Amino acid sequence: MGAGGLVPGDERVPAADINDNILAKQVLGNKADAAVSSVVSTASAIAYLKGILGSSILATGTFSTSSATVPADTGRTEGDGYWNGSWLIPLSGTVINQPRQIAAFANTGGVFTLDSEHPFTAAPGTVDYIIVGSGSNLVPATDSAADQTMAHVIGKKDDTIGGDSLVALAKILQAAVDIIDAFHDVPSQDSSDDNQIRDVVGKKDDTVGGDSLVAIAKQVIVDVTSAVDEPPTAKSLHDILHKDGNFTYDNTTDSLEAIADAVGAIATGSSVETVGPFSYLDAGAEQDVMEDAVTTRRHVSVEVDFTTMTVDGTVRIYRKVDGSTYRLWLEQLISASGTETVFDARFTTNQEWKMTYQEVSDEGAARSVPFNTIVEVIE
C-alpha cells in the first residue's frame, strides 16, 4: 500500500483534505477538498481553486423575476443594502456574463436595483446568477442626475457648470477663480467697460474726461484748483470759497465769510453758577434750597448731595409756568439708608423756579447739604 491508502498505478482520487504530498494526484486533490484562503504546505490545487473562487464569487442564486433594471430573487435573505456596490452576473440567457453594478438591494422580495445608467441590455430571464465583488469603472452620462454610485458623485469630464458632480463643482470653482483673478488686472485707459470693480476704479492715467473714480477725482482737483483767485461767476463752490485778486474776502451775502460774520454777530449767552452748601435747619418742615427769580430764557442744571442726611426726605422743584404761581414740577424721595442719596435735574425755562427739601421725620440737628446749579442764558 502506498501513502494515503493508495497503491502505485491506482487511478482512484485521494481522500478529501489529505495532507500527503507524494503523488501528483495528491497535489491535485479531491473534489471534496475544503477551500483554503491562505498559503499552506499541505493544501491541494482543488482547495486553492475553491479559495480563489470563494473570494471572487460572493453568492449564487436564481432570478425569480426577470428585469433589465430590477431583477429579483425571493430566495435571498440578506438585509437591505447588503449587496450594494457588488456586481450581478447572469450565467445564461440573453445577457449571459453581462456584469452590472448593484445600486441598491432590498430584503423584501430580494430586489436588486441596478445602476440606472447601466442596466442589463435586456431582461436576463429566470436564470442562475452570481454576485462578485465591487469595482466599477463605468463613467456616468454627462451631467447625470443619478446619485447611486461614487461614479455619479465624481461625474464625467464633460460635465457642465450647471451640474452637481465633483467635476461640475470644480469647473464652477475654476470659473470663480478666473473672475477673481481678473479683478487684479488693470483696465485700459479711459475704459468704457462697467463689468467689474476694477472698471469702476479705473487706471492711473485715466483722463479728466473719463468716468472712472480716478478720472472723477482728477476732475474734482481741476475744478477746485481753477476756483482759486478768480472772480465768481455763479452760485458755485467757487463763490462760497472765493477770495478776490487782492487776497481779501469779498464778503458776498452767501459766502462762508458772510455766514461766519453773521454767526459771530449773534450775541452769545452767559452762564452763572451757584455753589452750596445749603443748611437744612433743625426746625424741619419744607425749606428752600435755592430760588431763581429771573425770567429770561435759560438752561438750568441742578445737582444736590444728601449723604449728610440721617433720615429720609423729599426734594421738590417748583416752576411758575403761568408766570405768577409756583406749581410742583418734580418730586423725589431721598432714602438716607439707600445707595442713591444724590439728586440732579436738567430743564429749560423762562420763568421763576425754586428747589426745596423736607425731612420725613425729625433730623434732630441742622445738616449741611452740598449743591451746585448752573444757569445758562440763551437769549
Image (spheres, grey):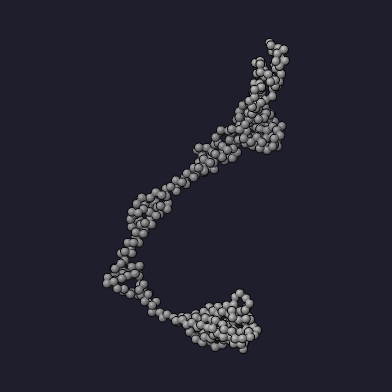
- Which residue corresponds to the image point at 40% horizontal and 79% vertical from the top-left? 266
Locate residue 76, reporting x and y percent. Answer: 70, 33
Viewer-side residue, 268 vs 111: 268
The quarter of the rendered structure image containing the N terminus is top right
Dividing the picture into quarters, in which one does residue 131 lie? top right
Q: Is residue 367 above or below residue 188?
A: below
Q: Is residue 215 above or below residue 89?
A: below
Residue furthest top in the image? 9
Residue furthest left in the image? 246
- Which residue corresponds to the image point at 39% horizontal and 49% vertical from the top-left? 185
Q: Is residue 357 left or right of residue 268?
A: right
Q: Is residue 108 visible?
A: yes
Locate residue 90, reporting x and y percent. Answer: 64, 28
Locate residue 356, reporting x and y percent. Answer: 58, 84
- Which residue corresponds to the image point at 44% horizontal and 81% vertical from the top-left? 269
Q: Is residue 94 visible?
A: no
The quarter of the rendered structure image containing the C terminus is bottom left
Q: Is residue 182 left or right of residue 221?
A: right
